[in-house]
Amino acid sequence: MNIKNIFNSSLLGLGLVGSSIASSTALVDDLHQATIIQLKANAGQELNLADFLKNGADIVRETEPQTLFWFALQGEHETFVIFDFFHDNAGRTAHFSGKVAAALHENASTLINGGWDKGVLDKVQNSEVLSTNDYQPDTVLKATKASYIVLKAQPGKEKELETLLRSAASIISKTEPETSFWLALKLNDATYAIFDTFVDEAARTFHFKGVVASTLKNKASNLIAGGWKNGVLNNIHHFDILGSA
């Protein structure tokens, strides 16, 4: 399967190939909104979905100035993830009206378990960016590994957990130079998450032995439902980065 041909044929049918791209300076700061979509490949389509997502990074880079960062990730058990970041909801809306979304819609029934409605739309999770480290965009785009952790606050501890996550960003900046990108996210009133990217596996290992990880471990029983083991460790998901923009 030629994935570039999939993109071209899908976009041609939607009248998108050959359209002019308005020149615009991408925002490089002020990340406020994020979206994660967890995808499971149809049986036998793992390589094709991986190739599709790798090529998607180039399309996002060329056509979506309001998508500040876009990551295609591969985990275990036929699991893939798209993670993207925006300045505002207008950027998110533009992204979901864009070329990669159109091509994914066109090919979801072939590539993704559950197709477009159940395999893509039902898996969309929007969130608010609470804080980030002092990242350098060029370095972020060279990362090869990523991790994602979902944290549910203990009842009544939402503000305290949120404060910890907001303050952690500056500690990451000072103590973890090879954690290229670190973000604290708020999924809903009681659920939070951490997304981070790394230069390599060694950097990821260092991160999980760092100051922020130690602080989170010490406070987990008080702040996080399930404590350290069930509330943190069991909710860590590691990924390889297939492509980024």
Image: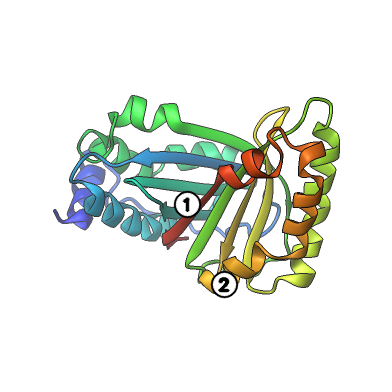
Mark 1 is surrounded, within 10 Å at the Cα level, by few (under 14), some (14 to 19) or many (20 or more) other residues, namely many
Q: Can residue 159 be seen from the camera position used here?
A: yes
Q: Amino acid at mark 1?
A: Glu
- The amino acid type of the residue labelled 2 equals Asp
Above or below — where is 41 with respect to 131? above
Residue drawn 64% across the image and 70% down it: 206
- Relative horizontal placement of residue 55, taking residue 227 as reference (left or right): left
Q: Nearer the viewer's eye, disc 1 or disc 2?
A: 2
- Pick the residue in front: 23 or 168: 168
Q: CA distance from mark 1 to mark 2?
A: 17 Å
Q: Residue at x 37, y 45 (%)?
A: 79
Position of 225 relative to 20 (above/below)? above
Q: Earlier in the sequence, mark 1 or mark 2?
A: 1
Q: Position of residue 226 (x, y in %)?
A: 68, 34
Q: Dot 2 corresponds to which residue?
A: 138
Residue 64's tag is 1
The kind of secondary structure element at disc 1 is loop
Residue 24: image quadrant is bottom right
Q: Residue 154's x, y, as percent?
A: 77, 30
